[in-house]
Image (tube, coloured by chain):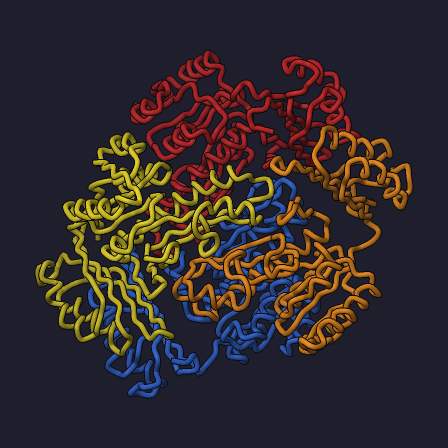
Chain colours: A yellow, B blue, C orange, D red
């Protein structure tokens, strides 16, 4: 089984009931699919069912493009939120940045060596500073200066641009603007942010300064989906690094840069591989 | 769904083929079982399939005791290694120790607060030192002094004792004797050892001394199934802790004690919850 | 140099100025002391100097008991907070507990095998539950039921008891009462607490429940000195463990127990070895 | 105290004796230096003394360039290995690479944002592949194809080149050639390698393949000084990442890339800040 084999991935959540795994796997089996990976989770307190299945479609008896219609009746019966993605279309991801380059340069380098199965059709920024970095990797860079007065209009233009480029998800790679509810809801559970603290500690601005003042012995970084409430969205991934009394604020920023890069890259990878389901204020991550 | 609901757990491995998940989950579904947890793995290089399924048997249409016979034909068709365990019988685990108490006292304390769903019918040792600790927790303690001359005979007596107590698995909690192939093969993939190094580094004796001499910056502990080859069995769990040039051999031993306790406890928990399948020289751990 | 050699340890902090290391080390050298370990830190933003020096007193030219008076003039000149402890007197530590046993049993076991260079003259509790555990290790156990009405009077009795036993430090090993400012100030920077979260996240009660609701991917434990402000004292040590969507609240509590034990034991060890200096709201830990 | 203040750093090791800290700190103090950071370690089993002191030379009473001659008599008396580095000269580091770019691009990016206080006068490679990456950062790139027949001659040319550029240290950023003893001894304790395993596990070639076959649950990376014995040199830094049965060889390589980058960058930082002393087969790292 080579990784070039055509594949389909289904992500689905619905109220729990008997027979879900059996009926979903049977749906795949009876059409000639071979399940390569199946992860399943039941949240017993919420009585919710979550599943990710990937299967080979090389011997599939129906065209992959008809999969959606074929599965729809079952999904309706289950009352499910779901989607099926096919291996022949890569997820299209826009990256938003401001002036810090560490996350952007890391994502672009990883992308260049094939770590992510995505396309990056464009980069958006409220500053021109990182245009040369984007140019080095041959990715169009769009500058949208933002002020309080122009924000609403600018976001509308950005959304237009994203739609023109058929963008599926947005990564905020240290983008220093708060997105409006209008934007966030348009891309619900599809805008990934990196916050440079171990959330819920140190929300808001200057988390390294806050950490330095509090005297913590460990700092962190958190990647989460953006919601209307600042730094409150469902957490995708977190990681930490130890610090000591010797570490100055500059040391925290330096050590934190490595964390931010790693955590954001992992979150993007998980999202792009369809490994995340949102469960209320939390995530189910099939790693 | 309370945790007191009757449950069954199936562990199965077989050559990979289409329809395995579908047919296994259908087997459970058509008998009224509700799948609570399903983990599945395909080793694409070895073309092997591994699965762990747990389901509620509260509405099961056949008596749980008939499950084995009911599933046997399917298992035979798949060419599977498999077993089904029912929640009404706890795994029975014997602990072997010598003189070090840290692993034993930790396992017994965890057991006393209900961390493991096991029974510990007996403790075996080649020294009498830890008998008071066993007595504190009310567990019978059997002393079998071992010499090169008596080893074969002693092991035979130990196996008899284990059989009398219907023991399913053996934990070597810093037991300072090498078991014979005869013993190991009798309890294949059921003898869990803790080695106080990050295997395959520092096999054999005095791994902390070896680590100290080599000047490593991290030490580890490894829990693995015992095979005929010393310290070469399939690895279940590993963990590490950082050290510095300030740490003496005594510090390594002290820090390592904490590691050994944690790693062995995790391994026993994973084994007792039927979460491990052996795949050649490696393990599949459905954590 | 055997570890049984007589030693002295000086902990000192003062405003930074030139020559501090030279003059302190010279003070020791000219009296025949041999420095075994010296750690020094300058907080350049606060312009404060911190030092820990330990030295062998086996060839010391003055009696160790005269050290304090001999050094006092220098300390006065420096405007220093300081103390010198001699190896012939162990720190005396009281442990306060309520009903949870995991931290207490771990501390007592570690103490029994010599991990801490302390004496534990007594254990105090507001419940009788853990008396058998204390008895097993032969340590007097004093029960002081506490109500809002009696708290002030009870704390006075507890302080009397601590003074009778010449107690230097208090460890709150999951003690479920908030100490009054009167108590805290009496033992300023000498009451060590374990909080079962990654502070400053999840202050107050039920941190595991809060963590579970927030959907974090990592949980932590924090040991800190107790101050008048709940969970705000200077942090001594923190550690974390990864969790996933599979972990229920009970799993968080179970995994957290291991963290709490480890973090509290490390904090007590650091404190008992005179490795901690308080720097405002933060600590300097010479590990 | 700004970081732009002129500083000196002394690294020294010698047989242990009384008064070393006092006399070294007094040497600095009496010349008007203010100690900013002092770390000291005594290896009691080897009876060796190690120290790193950094001090401000802004009020120094002798020219910094005379420091070496001024201290030489004391060093001779102590029988010390030592050096003093002055802040006005950056360490000069050459990077050797082959075809893998991940370590090189990470080091160059870190260098470009000022993480290392070094100059990188040149990059050496046995392949031309990474020349464009070097060009992007404006660093001269020298290609020296190596065969068994030409190795001796090529190394001689490389050493000439390093000497022309006044190179202090060499970083092997996944350089796929074994250096000859002649080269290694010329730059003793100054050639830093990154090995993609948790040494001493998996020495030699294909460590990820070895790790995959052994079924370890954690992989690592190790940075060490190069000696004549392959992968046996004194270890500077190590780190690890967890893996599971799901991780293929490609996943190990991907996860390992992040480790290699981080570990090598930390090692270079420690070396460039004069924080490492070699102690036989081990290192003392004053972090």
Seen in the image, is C285 located left or right of residue B70?
right
Looking at this view, is A232 or D108 the one in front?
Answer: A232
The number of discs equals 0
Asked if residue B275 lies left or right of residue B266, the reply is left
Residue B240 in view of the camera: yes
In the image, residue B25 above or below residue D26: below
Task: Using the rendered view, name the quadrant where residue D96 is placed.
Answer: top left
- Residue D38 appears in which quarter of the rendering? top right
Residue at 54% from the left image edge and 29% from the top image edge: D271
Q: Residue D104: horizontal and vertical position, in percent?
A: 38, 30
> At 36% across and 63% down in the image, what residue appears?
A282
Q: Position of residue B44 (x, y in %)?
A: 27, 55
Quadrant for the C terminus of chain B in the image: bottom left
Question: Where residue D235 sits: x, y (%)?
Answer: 54, 36
Name the quadrant of the N terminus of chain B: bottom left
Q: Residue furthest front?
A: A149
Depicted C75 relative to depicted B105: above or below? above
Q: Is residue B285 above or below residue C277?
A: below
Instruction: Locate residue C138 relative to residue B111 in the image: left or right.
Output: right
Q: In the figure, residue A106 lies in which quadrant? A: top left
Q: Is residue A178 above or below residue A275?
A: above
Given residues C66 and C18, the one toward you in this image is: C18
Q: Is residue D114 left or right of residue A57?
A: right
Report x, y in % for residue B89: 45, 81
Identify the residue shown where x is 43% and y is 50%. Answer: A204
> Does residue B179 appear in the picture of this structure?
no
Which of A45/C118 is in front?
Answer: A45
Residue depicted at 69% across the width and 40% down the height? C50
Query: For this rendering, which residue is in front, A104 or B36?
Result: A104
């Amino acid at each position: 089984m080579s990784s070039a084999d055509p594949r389909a991935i289904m992500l689905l959540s619905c109220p729990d009931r008997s027979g879900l795994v059996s009926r979903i796997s049977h749906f795949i089996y009876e059409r000639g699919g071979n399940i390569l990976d199946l992860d399943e989770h039941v949240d017993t307190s919420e009585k919710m069912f979550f599943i990710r299945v990937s299967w080979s479609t090389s011997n599939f008896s129906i065209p992959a493009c008809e999969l959606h219609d074929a599965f729809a009746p079952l999904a309706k019966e289950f009352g499910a939120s779901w989607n099926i993605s096919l291996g022949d279309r890569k997820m299209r991801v826009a990256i938003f940045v401001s002036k810090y380059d560490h996350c952007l340069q890391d994502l672009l380098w990883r992308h260049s060596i094939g770590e992510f199965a995505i396309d990056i059709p464009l980069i958006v920024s409220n500053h021109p500073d990182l245009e040369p970095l984007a140019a080095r990797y041959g990715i169009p860079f769009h500058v949208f200066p933002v002020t309080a007065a122009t924000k609403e209009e600018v976001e509308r233009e950005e959304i237009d641009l994203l739609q023109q480029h058929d963008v599926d998800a947005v990564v905020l790679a240290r983008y220093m603007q708060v997105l409006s509810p209008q934007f966030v809801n348009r891309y619900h559970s599809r805008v990934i942010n990196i916050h440079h603290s171990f959330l819920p500690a140190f929300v808001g601005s200057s988390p390294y300064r806050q950490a330095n003042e509090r005297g913590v012995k460990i700092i962190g970084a958190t990647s989460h989906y953006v919601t209307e409430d600042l730094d409150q969205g469902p957490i995708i991934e977190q990681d930490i690094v130890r610090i000591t009394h010797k570490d100055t604020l500059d040391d925290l920023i330096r050590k934190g840069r490595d964390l931010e890069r790693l955590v954001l890259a992992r979150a993007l990878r998980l999202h792009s591989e369809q490994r995340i389901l949102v469960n209320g204020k939390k995530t189910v991550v099939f790693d």
